[in-house]
Amino acid sequence: MTGPLPLKAIADSVRSGARTSVDVATEYLDRIERGAALGAFLAVDRARTLAEAAAVDARVARGEALPLAGVPVAVKDNIHAVGFTTTCASRMLEGFRPPFDATVVEKLRAAGAVVLGKTNLDEFAMGSSTENSAYLVCRNPWATDRIPGGSSGGSAAAVAANLAPAALGSDTGGSIRQPAALTGTVGLKPTYGRVSRFGLVAFGSSLDQVGPMTRRVEDAAMLHDVLSGHDPKDATTSARPHAPTAPHVGDGVRGLRIGLPDEYFGDAVDSEIRASVESAGRALEAAGAVLKRVSLPHTPHAIPTYYIVATSEASSNLARYDGVHYGRRHPEAVDIASLFTGSRSAYLGKEVKRRILLGTWCLSSGFYDAFYDRALRIRSLLKADFDAAFRDVDLVLCPTTPTPAWRLGEKISDPVQMYVADILTGACNLAGIPGLVVPCGTTGQKDTRLPIGAQLLGPAWSESLLLRAGAVIEAACWDPSFVPSFGSAS
Amino acid sequence: MNISKEDVVKTLRLARLEVPESELPDLVREFDSIVKYVEAVAAVDLRGVEPLSHGGDARDVFRDDVVTPSLPADVALGNAPDTAGGCFRVPRVIAEPS
């Protein structure tokens, strides 16, 4: 096999002794150094990662059964991993050292994975381009003058450029799926409650989920199986047992009914993207699925509703940054008012302030009923749309983004333009259902080809079906071993 | 709805935030466009529709009332900007008696 190996092959090679975990980690750490210009990582610690890898080699030598033996995984920097800082790409959390692992990181480490570093993101995961990072510009490996999407842009860029074989992202309104689509990678947003949020820094607590970002669908399934399950430390995780998805990735789609929602194929979506996703649909049809048009009539209201719900929750969650327990304190704080207001104003970035402002407004006396309460009622309608569609079809296939990756700086001065980038991804989080993005083609621009992602949405707990359908699209439409050459950093 | 400078200043105060006077006009303009965008929710017919606060199957969760290990105090205080005697230290909250 040429090109980057599937995760299973990496783990097999370490388990069989063909390579050590230290060899594998060294290979990726070297690549991260050569690819530093992409701005994908906020923290890399060679000594720490090699020590983790050596510990995995010792566990392999003792005969421990490790499904992810020696697999290096990059972790979005809003997820705690002991040994690394968690900054959320915010000045507020500069130097913050988490005293515990997120449950997802604990599970990865228990399975033999090695934390490769912490990846760049929009500050507190608020953004669609990673341009809201307080630290580093992050670039799309397919065209380095373009954004990698966001907010998990660093994880997406790292996987696309093969600086990491896999990464964790978090998805509140599309933050795994949108960057996956814009970088030609696979991203899974699990059902709400499937994966623990313990140790994920909270943004919108009723929307946030952690999920895998990988080169291949089978890799996403493998990680998803490790990450899933009930966690006593997160009361919103489901007690429902997780049935492994990886053994069924190759089961195909024969007889599955797949819906194409009219509202997701409108004129607002770039015609090349529509055509590419329609060809992914034909690939599913050729594999035995039945395609059907469906309607999700409340879709036009999804993004206003999403921004009200997400920012309202964020305004409450981010109240914790008060300069007292952790995070930075303004050096001139002399009383409680200047402690709170001074610290928050000095160390939170512009977009974070805008969103806290909107959330505070939507929850404030006089506006709660007109904004927050109405948004929660529209949320019911959006969920009812999906419930109705899933009585007719098993899954829905649609585009992920209205456009391919745009140029750095193109939308940064217009917040509403940036919000509209989430127009095809936000409803999934509001309804709590799972979504998978699989690359299905590229735009045909002469100077630069840009990836396109097909989005599959399914009812709650349908990850296995999504991954099966995703594998069919991947096999027909994409070469997962292809790594874009990003300038001098090959 | 048109957003005024007073609306923004009042909401900033509720959120314990401040922006420099020079940045206020831009913020008022941006916030006005954001509120006009999300205001679209006013046009939806919601008669008989119940609010939904989350899409998952979560419900009240109970556990036995037993003590489980928690972070040692020095670790819990490890990221604090200022501490004293095993506590978080903050500027004086209550004025000296006059």
Image: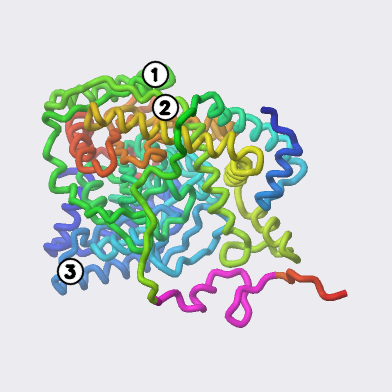
Q: Amino acid at mark 2?
A: Thr
Amino acid under label 3?
A: Val
Range shown magenta: B67-90
Q: Please give the residue where the numbered disc 3 appears in the rendered image.
A: A60
Q: Amino acid at mark 1?
A: Gly
Quadrant assignment, res A370: top right
Q: Position of residue A41 (x, y in %)?
A: 43, 52
Q: Earlier in the sequence, mark 1 or mark 2?
A: 1
Horizontal arrangement in the rendering, residue A216 relative to residue A333 (left or right): left
Quadrant of residue A12 in the image? bottom left
Q: Residue at x 45, y 69 (%)?
A: A99
| Callout 1: chain | A
- Contact? badges 3 and 2 (CB < 8 Å): no
Q: Position of residue A294 (x, y in %)?
A: 29, 22
Main secondary structure along the magenta-highlighted residues: loop
Marking on residue A299: 2
**First-in-chain label (1 vs 3):** 3
Cβ–Cβ under 8 Å for marks 1 and 3: no
The chain under label 2 reads A
Q: Earlier in the sequence, mark 3 or mark 2?
A: 3
